[in-house]
Every structure is written in C-alpha cells, then in structure tokens.
Amino acid sequence: MLSRRRFLGAATAAWACAITRRPARAIGPGSQFRISQLAIEGTNWNPRPTALRRLCWGVEKRTAIDAARDPVVVKLNDSALFHRPFLYLAGDGDMPLPNAAGIDALRRFLTLGGFMVIDSAQGAASGAFDHAVRQLMEAVFPPPAKGLTLVPPDHVIYKSFYLLDRPVGRIAVSPTLEGVMQDGRMLVAYAQNDLGGAWARDNFGNYLFQCEPGGERQRELAFRLGINLVMYALCLDYKADQVHVPFIMRRRRWRGMGGGGSAVP
Amino acid sequence: MNVTLLTAGVRLTIAIIAAALTLAAFIGRRRAPRFSASLALLAGLAVVVVIADRITVLLAGAAHRGDVLNDYAWAWAPPWGDAGAWLGIGLAVIAIGLGAAAGRRIQSPFQRALVLGLRIVGVGAALAVVLRPAIDLMHIEYEPNHVAVLIDVSQSMGLQASPGKSRLERAQAIIRASQPTFASWRGRHLVDFFTFSSTAVASSPAAIESAEASGTETRILGALQAVSTQLEAGGDLAGIILISDGVDTVTADPGTPEGLAGVGPVHTLLPAKSELRDIAVANILADGIAFVRTPITIEAVIKSNGFPAEPRRVTLTKDGQVIRQAWAKPAGSHRAKVSFELAPDRVGKHVLEIATPVAEGETVTTNNRRAFVLNVIRDKLRVLQVAGQPSWDVRALRGLLDQNPNIDLISFFILRTQEDVGMEPDSELSLIQFPTRELFEEALPTFDVVILQNFNYFPYGMGTYLDNIRDYVNGGGGLVMIGGALSFASGRYAHTPIASVLPVTLAPSASDLIDTEEFSPKLTDKGRTHPITALHYDVTANNRAWSALPPLEGINRVTGVRPGAAVLAVHPRLVTRDGKPLPVIVAGDIRDGRSLAITTDSLWRWQFWAAGKGDTGSSYAAFWENAIRWLTRDPDLRHLRVTARAQGSPKQPVIVDIELSETDYSPLAGGNVAIEIGPTKRPSRVPVETMTVTTGDDGRAHAEVKNLAPGPYRVTATADVGGRPTHASDVVVVPTADAELRQPAADSATLAAIAEQTGGRFLGDASAIPADLPLSPPSTRTVDREVTVKLWSRPGLLILALALLALEWALRRRARTL
C-alpha cells in the first residue's frame, strides 16, 4: 500500500516535473537514448503503437537517462540500424525470415555491440510469433552457437535499476526471460508476456489493456522490467560489480522478510 | 698400544670397595657374623676379579710382543658357538647354586662364605676354560678426515682488533700459534685452509699469511655451507673452525638452525674483542620490486652491541615522510627483527629508509639509518569511471575497459538524480549512495586514471573533494574529462580546482557552452604523431583511418588551451574566442600527472556507427588504449629512458644509462641528453651535478657520476625528440658506507650461536686453536693384519679350577656337610 505521505510526495514531485521540465542532459540529439523499432515487412511489427513512447516517458522521468520519447523505425537493410544500439522487435503472429543480407546485418548489429528486445504480443507462451522468433534466432546464431537460452534469475537484467523477481508484462504466462548470451553479454532478450501491452496507453492517458492476473501492480512491474532493459543496454553489467553486491543482497533479504513492496503476481 | 680390560679407574674403585667390605666384615664379625661373612665373600671376589684382569692383560701384552699391531678387540670362542657359551654359563650358575644350597649346613658363616667363594672361583675358572676368551690383535690404517679452517678476509677484518693489530693479523697469528695443534692431529685429520668473503676459496697457511682484508661482502653461512658440502662429498668432515668477526653482510641471521642444517660441527673463534658500542640497521629484507596496492612486508634486522637489551624505536620513511614505526628489542644474540607492512599506492621508484635513533656513546652513527629504493610496478591498471548519466558513450567505454584484462575498472554511474521522480521504496531499487568520500578521499590515490564522463560534481556535495582530485593529478595521476551537457563549463568546473588540472580553459559563465551539430574532427600536426591519436604507425594509414571515422555530434565549447598542452584534434568549423579552432582532443602534462580533455560525448560512434560501415570498432579501441597508456606513462611509449644504479660503496661512481629513440621508436643516434642529479625531495631540487652525454648509433649513452655524498638522488634526463623536450627520471641511493664497514662491531653472539647450533665450541678470542677440540673421529679404517691370541684356554687354568673345587670339597667334608 502506498502511504499517504509517500503518495503526496510523489504527486508533488510529479507536478513539479510537469511544470519545470528537466534540462536536457545529452549534448546532441544523437546522444539521447532512443529506441529503434524494427519493421519487418509483411508483419504486424507494431502491435502496441504507443507502448514505447510511454516506456521512454517513464525512463525519462524515473532515471537519469536522457531519453527521446518517440522510437525510430528501422529496417534491417537501413544504415540507420547502426545509429542506435537498442533495437525493439514486436509481433503478434507469424513473421517471415529476413533475407540473407538482413540476417547478416542483424548478426553484425548484435555481435558488435547492439542489444535487441523481442516482445511477443501474441498473448500466449507459444504460437506463430514464438515459432518465427526461434527460427530467426537460429538463422542469426546457427549451431553450434547456443541461441536462445533461459535467463537465470540472478542475471543483472533483474537488478540493473529495480530489483525484480520475475519478468511480467500484460500477462504472466512465462516465468522467465529467454536470451542470447555471448562473452557474458546479453545480445537479445526475449519476453513472451507482452510487455508492450502493459505499457500502451491511449491519447487520453488510459491504459489500453488490463494486466492479468496482477492488475496495476503487475503493470508497474512491467514498466520496471522495461526500464531495467533500457538500463542494461546503457550500463551493461554495471550492477554486477562487486561494489553493489552487498547492498543488493541486503535489500533482497529485507524484502524476502516482508519489508518493502508487495508480492509479485 | 696398551691393552686394557678394566680401566685403572674401575680397578681402583673395585679395590676401594673390597677394602671397605673387608673392614666392615672385620668390624661386624661378632655382632653380625652372617652379614660380615657375606661382605667378606664379596670383597674376596672383587680381589679375584682384579687379579684376573691383571693376569689377562699380562697374558695379552705378552702375546703382543711389541709388534706393529696397533689395535685390539676382545673376543671368545666357546665350543658350539653362542649356544655352548649359554650352556656353560647355565651349568656354572647351577653349580654355584647347588654349592650355595649345600653350604647352608655349615655352622660357621665365614666357613660357609669361604666354601661358596671357592665354588664360585672354581666354577668361574672352569667356565673360562670352556668359553676360551681371546684377544684379536690388529694393525689398522685410518683414512684421515678433514678439518676445515675458514678465515674471514672481508674488509671488516681489516678493522683494528687490538692496538696496532687488525682482526686479520690476529687471525694470522692464531694460525701460526696453532701449528702444534695441527701437528698433533696428523694421521687422523687433514687440515684444509680456506679464506672467504663472498665465496670460500681454498688456501694455505702461507697464503693466509699474506692475505688482505679486501672482500666487499661477508657470507658466513654461504661459506660454511659450501665448505661443508665440498668436504662431505670428498670424504668425511671432522669439523670446521671458523675464524671471523661474525658480521655477515648478506644473511640477516646466520646462526639459525634452518640455515645451519647439515653443517658442522663448527667451532668458532673471534679474532677481536667486541668492545665497540653500536646500534645498527644491519639488514633489510625486502624485494626491490612491489606491485602497487599489493601488501608487502619489509623486515629489518636491528643489531645492538654494548647496550642493554631495551626496546628501540624503528621508523620506516617513504620519500622523506615517516609512514610506519615499530619497536625492536635486541636481546639474546643482540639482534631483533622488525616488520613493516605496507601496500604501496603509487607506481614508481620510491626511496624508503629504515632508521633507529642514535644512542648515547655509539661508536658509529651512520649505520643507524639505511635507505633503499622500492620500485613499485602495476600488475593491472586501476581505472575509475564516473559518469553523470547512462548513455551510449558510457556504455561503449565501460564495455571496452571492462573487457581489457589489464584493467581493473571501477565504475560509478548516476542512475537517478534528485530531479527524477520515484514512488517506489528504496528497497525495491538496486541503487546505492554515491560513495564520494570513499572514492575521492580514501581510494583516490589507488587509481591510475580517473575518468569524469559527462559528470557534474555539484549535486553530490563533492566540492570539498575537488582539491583532492587536483592534488591527485599534480602528484602523478591521470585524469580524463569527457564532454557532455554535464561536463566542462556546463558542469560548473570553471574556477574550480579541477579547472587547474585540465589541459583546456573554461568559460566562467556563458549561455553558449554547447554546440549540437555533427562534425568530423581534424587531426592537428601534433595529433598525427602523438601516441594517443596515432591509431596506426604509418602516417598515411593513420590519416586514412581518421578520415574513415564516423562523424561526431555535439561539442563543449572551451575558451582555449592551457600553455604547453598538445591539441590533437580540432573542430573543422568552430573556433574559440581567440580565433583558433575549437579543440576536441587535448592532452597535457600537469606537473607529475597527465590530463586529457575530450570535448564531446559521441566517441561511441567510432565503435558502433563504424560497425555499420564494416569496421569492427578497432579505431575506438586503439584510441582508448593509446590514451590509457599515455596517461599512465607506459614505459613502452617513452622515447627517453634513464637508469641509474649505485654500486656497493660510496667511493664507486653512480652509473647512469640512457636510451633514446626517435618518434617512431627507432634508436636516436647523436642525441644530446642533459643529465641532472639532485635531491629527491621537493622543493629543494637544486641539482648537485649536471652533465651532457651524446647517444651512440644504438641510441644509448653511458655516464658515471663520482663523489656523490651518501643519500638518495633523483637523476633526471632531458633530450630533444621530434623537436620537443622529453624527460625521464630515475631514483638512486648512494650507500652511507661500504656494506662491510656499516657494522664495525664484532659479533660474538652470532659466532656463539653458530657453534651452539652445530654442536661445536665457541672459543671466544682464544689466541690459538686448542688441540682437544671435539672433532669427529675418522670413520674409514682398514684392517690389514690380525692375530688372535687365546688367553685362558690352557691346562693350568683347568688345574686351578680343579684344585679350587677340590679344596672346597675338602672344607665341606671337614664341616660334615657332604
């Protein structure tokens, strides 16, 4: 439960932010954090059109990151693919495999420093989109590369800003993220719980979808996961540094004893 | 050869006992006749034993007949071997037992004792006939074993031992006076002579007579081990006689059981009296090299002669400042070991000194302190990256530095500021308090490079730590400021202590502090060959690499460049107020440190944007690798190197070696190098010696500096490389005295300890080697002649036995006990 004092404090802070916009902290537009959204022709590549804008608003408000609100739409054969290291791929159905040049470009993007978040809006843990994602990953990282693997619960992605236990979105059908790892770095994070569905709002500020089964607390945790993904893209495994470990362990222990926030749905 | 069975002492003892028993028997014959009779029996038997011994020796001597036989051994030869002997002994015991039992019926105790005595002697004589005792007379040749006489001929042996006589002269007199002793050992021991200082050398009395005390160091333990090993290998060792003043200049304590294991026995002799009163830092046990921030232990041995065993303060000084102190209590062997632990926090050569205060009445005061050079090197570079906000630039730099196995990266990123809104409790966040005090007050000296990346100090209460960062740079640290909206003048650094250690100058306040346009930086002439911006060795390839780099975006406007700083890359269009191109990359030496300014936060494009063009980001990696190496003064990047080394004595010159290379690192021949030798401590760095040398074809030069007073010096070399003055320096310590003369007092405690540990004898300041030294006997002998003489296997003895037994029978018959 949000205490009255905390609610008033937060409300005051939000009001202050609304009327006094924080000074820009990036030196130029190219230095701002901005998401590239991957458009694959012939697919519904943007099933939650307002989701990323809302996520970036949260990133901007809650963290020190200077984030641009609107994503940039890129294709695999665009030179602009390499202008921003954060790529977002969403879908709710089947997705054709890109051509060889596209596969090569995506492989180059990921292995030379890029990070891609794949968000399934299909509403189920498997299906046509899931099948297409696995095909795509196998094409980009053919064996003997490991391809998609389960992300362990102690991965830095769950503590890069917020301390999280599970990756929930609009739904909570999959208890874990999957990812592609290389040399200790996560190149791809694949979420099947429809993160975009939890973030998306209409023009009047209302959320478009109910979060099930956890309601608004689950939506908050979905935002937090989105912010953690952004923070990981910009700081890598910073929160795995030894200096942070005792603090994080202490806080996790304290939460486990009943302190802090409510249980995760 | 004298044959003996019972020694004279034993015989005398038996005789006295026999007399005492006889007297006691006589006195008590009426009161206690039975007891007195027993005593008389024992006395009689004792007399018989002595008589038997004498007769045996007489017989053996007669058998010897003054032959060349020189040794003997007692033996027996009973029939049927040992079984026969045991059978004979058993029968003898039974016969005596039966005699004793039968004798009970005799009324008179004295008679009874007489009868029993006759039985014992008779049976004993019969047993001697059966056992057939014999003596083996032999001629034995002994292989003499070795006695090593070691004479110390180090310089300290030249010190005065007594008026008009040095320690060595006294040692020579001891050898002369010991000739009778050596002569008495002839046949059993061979005497080998050695002299030693750093090593043991075979010698002779004649050579010792003309030896000089000239050795520059004393290795007592090494010499003992070498001689022991050599003689044990060639034959057996009877013992070692060490004639030395006991001052080992290499081993901290040569008298320990560990060092002396397998050595000995060593008999020690001091050719001097340890009358000098002196306290000295005798030895320092420390490696000359240490890793930065890795704990090391420095041990020192404090020796005290002629002073009571009381605690003495010992200090460790680094570059003129006392950093540790300990208490030493020399006792027992008058030496004490003190240990100092420290973790050097700064790379480079440091002068450390261990000192103990001068006590009243000390003969020598210069040996109370001892300086040495500790060369602190790094195993890994330690880099602190502090970023004002997460960004692509932050990510690229962390990813690069974190992957480098030679870098220990500590990152601190501001993930949330006071301006950001958060409704969640802290327990749900992974954020920690920015540890400003720990970083910028405690740990700052431990970093080789500090990177302030788009970081504004103001919101974090860091104003008080800016002085520390300035001092860190001035003291030799590396600083990088990377641009961004929170950096340079936009980060309010103008007029702060940080501004004084930046290679660029900042506008105090202006609205136009940032330009956000894209641009491709231009390399300056300096930038084409500077180690930071030379991405390739070949200038053409380097220009090509720079022109292929993706454009940058956004720049912090600075007002100018600090005098002496090198502008490596500039903005192609924008200029500073004085009309010069706006700098993008500027590097400068700031007193002992180095500083690098990068006025943009978009270098990450050289990595990721370049990847889109087919590059792997190698230029970005090369740029940062160069920058880190330049900031930390990587020796591989130096064009001028100087090495200075002192020799063991202050009389010997300090040797200075120079290596000079061109900008492309090929040897620079014919280069003039100015050398200055001055004190290490600021601010009094007035040179005491200057000279100029010219390098040869191999780019090397050599110089010798004579007559430097003892103490630490900084040797600074300056040369012109590629039109720019280049500096290099080294540190050297000229010793206060020859190692041999640092401890003038003779060390009798060490000699006593060596003797004790090896089972030898400490002879003090004896004037000659005594003949009765406990030396090991030769273990090798050869028996080349042997004669066996049967002593008692003769009819007379059998007749004697029969006669005694007949007499016993007759007495018993008379007493009617048959």
Image (tube, coloured by chain):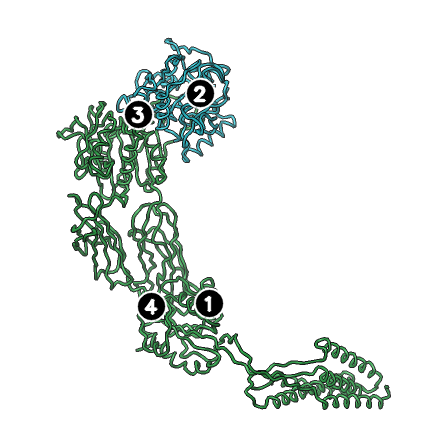
Chain colours: A cyan, B green
User: Disc 3 designates what residue?
Assistant: B612
User: Disc 1 designates what residue?
Assistant: B263
Asked whether the residues under the numbered discs 2 and 1 touch, taking CB atoms below 8 Å apart as contact, a structural biologist would say: no
Could you say which is closer to the camera, residue B752 or residue A92?
A: A92
Q: Amino acid at mark 4?
A: Pro
Q: Quadrant of the N terminus of chain B?
A: bottom right
Determine the image quadrant of residue B303: bottom left
The reply to the same-chain question for discs 4 and 1 is yes
> Image height check: is B353 above or below A202?
below
Give the Cα distance between marks 2 and 4: 86 Å
Q: Amino acid at mark 3?
A: Gly
Q: Is residue A213 left or right of residue A242?
A: right
Give the Cα distance between marks 2 and 1: 78 Å
Q: For the residues carrying marks 2 and 3, which lies nearer the camera in this image?
A: 2
Residue at point 77%, 90% (across, down):
B803
Determine the image quadrant of residue B281: bottom left
| Label 1, residues with CA under 10 Å away: few <14, some 14-19, many ≥20 | many
The reply to the same-chain question for discs 2 and 3 is no
Q: Say which chain tag 2 marks.
A: A
* Label 2 SS: helix
